[in-house]
Image (cartoon, rainbow, N blue to C red):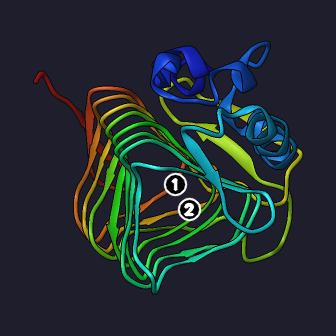
């Protein structure tokens, strides 16, 4: 399933978690490893650059964190990041350099690469968002199937399926992916590098890189 591979989705130079991806083929393989990786990495960070706040929370001294934001550990917030009013970080989260976590946005077990924007009323759980990925206002990841069975990633283009063996898998967004407002990304969704999703969409499965998801069954290749 080429369209869902780490190598097709992400520039690993754009995350402090680069080493976590070593030896893995698909991004959802990383999800169960995030918590322990943060604990290990956090303990090694330069104290002149990162301030430890509370238990297992490391925040770069240049990051802007609003007083009303809640941050639970383990968590790393990188250089220049902005955690806005009433953001809710539940833990096991890496917020990349110059990323924005906005008003009433909730994060849980995630990696946000550098310059990611989840700025307005987003839920991002058990997900990995690539460099400069952007989720429009109200767009969310759904990370658990309604029947509570294990998540399967399906690629209609290659007619392939992969069993993740995980109950909770949100969305894997490639570099510069754009998600329209009020869209829902169903469990196991993969949006390729430079792809776009129309507003109010309900997305399931793999959308290859450089495509536009208009609606189910209508995905068009584009050139930028």
Q: Which residue is mark 2?
A: 186
Who's the residue at 60% across and 21% down the image? 5
| Mark 1 vs mark 2, CA separation in Å | 5 Å
How many labels were placed on the picture?
Answer: 2
Between residue 127 and residue 198, name the one nearer to us. Answer: 127
| Image coordinates for residue 121, horizontal then vertical, percent | 37, 79
Left or right of 39 on screen, residue 121: left
In the image, is residue 60 above or below residue 135?
above
Q: Residue furthest front?
A: 48
Q: Which residue is mark 1?
A: 204
Disc 1 to disc 2: CB gap under 8 Å: yes
Is any atom of residue 206 visible in this view? no
| Image coordinates for residue 103, horizontal then vertical, percent | 35, 79
Left or right of 8 on screen, residue 91: right
- Give neighbour class at mark 1: few <14, some 14-19, many 20+ (Cα, 10 Å): many
Image quadrant where residue 29 sits? top right
Q: Residue furthest left?
A: 224
Who's the residue at 76% across and 43% down the image? 38
Res. 61 mark: none
Who's the residue at 45% across and 82% down the image? 67
Which image quarter holds the C terminus? Answer: top left
Image quadrant where residue 24 sits? top right
Between residue 211 and residue 25, name the one nearer to us. Answer: 25
Left or right of 36 on screen, residue 217: left
Q: Going from the N terminus, do you reach mark 1 or mark 2 first? A: 2
Left or right of 172 on screen, residue 82: left
| Image coordinates for residue 96, horizontal then vertical, percent | 48, 42
Is any atom of residue 123 visible in this view? yes
């Amino acid at each position: 399933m080429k369209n869902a591979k780490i190598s097709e989705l992400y520039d690993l130079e754009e995350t402090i978690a680069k080493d976590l991806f070593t030896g893995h083929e698909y991004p959802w393989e990383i999800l169960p490893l995030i918590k322990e990786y943060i604990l290990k990495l956090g303990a090694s960070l330069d104290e002149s650059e990162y301030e430890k706040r509370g238990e297992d929370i490391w925040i770069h001294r240049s990051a802007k964190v609003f007083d009303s934001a809640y941050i639970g550990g383990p968590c790393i917030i990188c250089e220049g990041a902005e955690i806005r009013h009433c953001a809710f970080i539940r833990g096991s989260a890496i917020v990349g350099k110059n990323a924005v976590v906005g008003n009433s946005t909730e994060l849980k077990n995630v990696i946000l690469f550098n310059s990611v924007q989840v700025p307005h009323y987003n839920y991002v759980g058990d997900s990995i968002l690539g460099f400069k990925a952007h989720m429009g206002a109200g767009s969310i990841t759904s990370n658990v199937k309604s029947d509570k069975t294990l998540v399967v990633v399906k690629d209609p283009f290659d007619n392939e399926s992969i069993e993740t063996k995980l109950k909770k898998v949100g969305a894997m967004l490639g570099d510069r992916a754009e998600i329209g407002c009020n869209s829902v990304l169903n469990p196991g969704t993969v949006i390729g590098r430079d792809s776009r999703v129309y507003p109010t969409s309900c997305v399931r499965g793999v959308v290859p890189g450089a495509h536009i998801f208009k609606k189910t069954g209508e995905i068009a290749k584009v050139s930028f």
